Image (cartoon, rainbow, N blue to C red):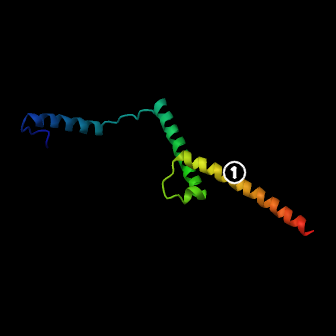
Amino acid sequence: MLCERHRGPGDFYITLALRFVLRMRTTDRPTKPISNRQMRNQAEKMRRDKLNTYISELATQVPMVAHSPKRTDKISILRLTAAYILMDRRMLIHSRNSGNSLMNSSD
């Protein structure tokens, strides 16, 4: 085994390191509980991942963003989505008004 042979002064430290690693593997170390900071970091990462998922889904639903040749940042996705919703709402109101005026003129 490598631990019994010593070729030079550097090998001694390698041997000590190997013994330490082997001892660490064989000892049963209790698992350390997750700290509050780690829990907050994990919760924040999950929140960011969820937000990014929803923004990406939104980007696929809005034609101005989905057909953009360049990658769009999150703020632009939200801004263009708001503009699209307002435009769609105005077009819907306009089409309802146009439909009512056509129906009234045919009477």
Number of residues whose C-alpha sits closer than 10 Å to that of mark 1, classed few (under 14), some (14–19) or many (20 or more): few
Q: Which residue is mark 1?
A: 86
Q: Nearer the viewer, residue 57 or 32?
A: 57
Q: Nearer the viewer, residue 6 or 43?
A: 43
- The three-letter amino acid code for the residue at tag 1 is Leu
- 14 with respect to 56 (left or right): left
Q: Residue at x 51, y 45 (%)?
A: 49
Helix, strand or loop for disc 1: helix
Which quarter of the figure is the C terminus placed in? bottom right
Q: Position of residue 81 (x, y in %)?
A: 62, 51
- 79 with respect to 18 (left or right): right
Q: Residue at x 40, y 35 (%)?
A: 31
Q: In the current view of this chain or complex, which residue is farthest to the bottom?
A: 106
- 10 with respect to 51 (left or right): left
Q: Position of residue 11 (x, y in %)?
A: 11, 37
Total labels drawn: 1
Residue 91 at least partly seen:
yes
Q: In the current view of this chain or complex, which residue is farthest to the front?
A: 105
Q: Position of residue 40 (x, y in %)?
A: 50, 33
Q: In the current view of this chain or complex, which residue is farthest to the right?
A: 107
Placement of 15 over or under 95, stated as above or below: above
Q: Residue at x 16, y 37 (%)?
A: 14
Residue 50 at least partly seen:
no
Q: Nearer the viewer, residue 48 or 102?
A: 102
Which quarter of the figure is the N terminus placed in? top left
Q: In the current view of this chain or complex, which residue is farthest to the top?
A: 36
Q: Residue at x 54, y 41 (%)?
A: 47
Q: Nearer the viewer, residue 35 or 105?
A: 105
